[in-house]
Amino acid sequence: MEYSRWAPLYRRISEELGLPFEREEAAFARLRELLPPEARQRPLERVARRLKGREVVVVGLAPDSGPPPLWRRPAGAARLAVVAADGATTACLTAGLVPDVIVTDLDGPVPAELAANQRGSLVVVHAHGDNQAAVAEWMPQFPGELVGSWAGPPRDGIIDVGGFTDGDRAAFLSEHVGARRILLWGFDFARVVEPDPEAEARKRTKLAWADRLLRELASEGRVPLLTWERDGTLSPYPGGIKGASTR
C-alpha cells in the first residue's frame, strides 16, 4: 500500500491507542543511526527479489498454530516464499524452515531471528515508540541482511508500506512488492493469551485493528489474500476478491 493511502489509517490508530508521533520520530532516529549503510540501500527492491511474483505464506503466531504445513502443497507446486511475523520464526526454524523474510518489532524471541538472519533470512526491523531499547540492544547483533521500517513517511532508506502489527505488516509488505498470492497461516484475532487485564484489552484493540487492516488490504483486490485453515483448505479473507482462486 502506498504511504499516501496508509497515512490516514495510521492516524486513526495512533489517536485511538494514544501513540505520540514524537516517540515514533525518536525511534526512527535511533533505527537510522544503527542500521548499516547497506541496509538503507534499495530496501524494497531487495525484498522484492525474494517475494515478487511468488505465492507467499505469511506465518503468524496464533495459539497452537505451529509451522505452515508446506507438505500439503500439491506435488510439483512451486515453493512458497515464507514470511515469518516475529515470534513465528521459532516455529518455522523448529520445522526446518528458514523464512525468506522476517518482519519484527523485536518483542518476540529475537535470538531465533538472529539465527535465521545468519542462515539467510532478510529481517525487516520495525522501530516504534515503545521499542527503542530493544532496537538499541538487538540491532548491532544481526549478522545478515536487514531492512528498516517505521510508522512515518518513507525516508533515508527506511520504509513504510502499511500495516500495524507484525502479521498484517508482513502481508502489506508482500502485497506492495508484488506477491502473486498471499496465504495467511496462524492468524487468530479472537484468542488472546495475556494474564494482565489491561494488557489484554490493549492487545485486543491491536488485533481488532490488524483484522480491519487485512480486510482493507483484501478489499483493494490487487493481490488475492487467503486464509490457510488448519485442515488444509484455503478461503478468501473477508472482504476480499470474490471468486478468488483457492486452488
Image (spheres, rainbow, N blue to C red):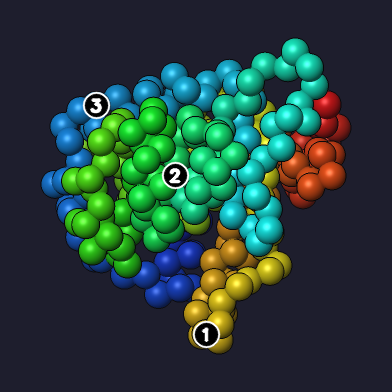
**29 or 14, which lies in front?**
29
Identified at 84% across, 44% down, the residue is: 231
Q: How far apart are marks 1 and 2 (CA)?
A: 26 Å
**219 or 181, which lies in front?**
181
Judge depth for marks 3 and 1 and give the one in front. 1
Q: Can residue 185 be seen in this view?
A: yes
Residue 14 lies, in percent from the top left, at: 42, 66
Q: In which quarter of the image is residue 73?
A: top right
Residue 213's place in the image compared with 114, above or below, is: below
Residue 41 is tagged as 3
Identified at 48% across, 73% down, the residue is: 16
Residue 196 is tagged as 1
Q: In which quarter of the image is the C terminus?
A: top right
Amino acid on which the number 1 mark rests in the picture: Asp
Amino acid on which the number 3 mark rests in the picture: Gln
Query: Dots 1 and 2: beta carbons under 8 Å?
Result: no
Identified at 61% across, 73% down, the residue is: 193
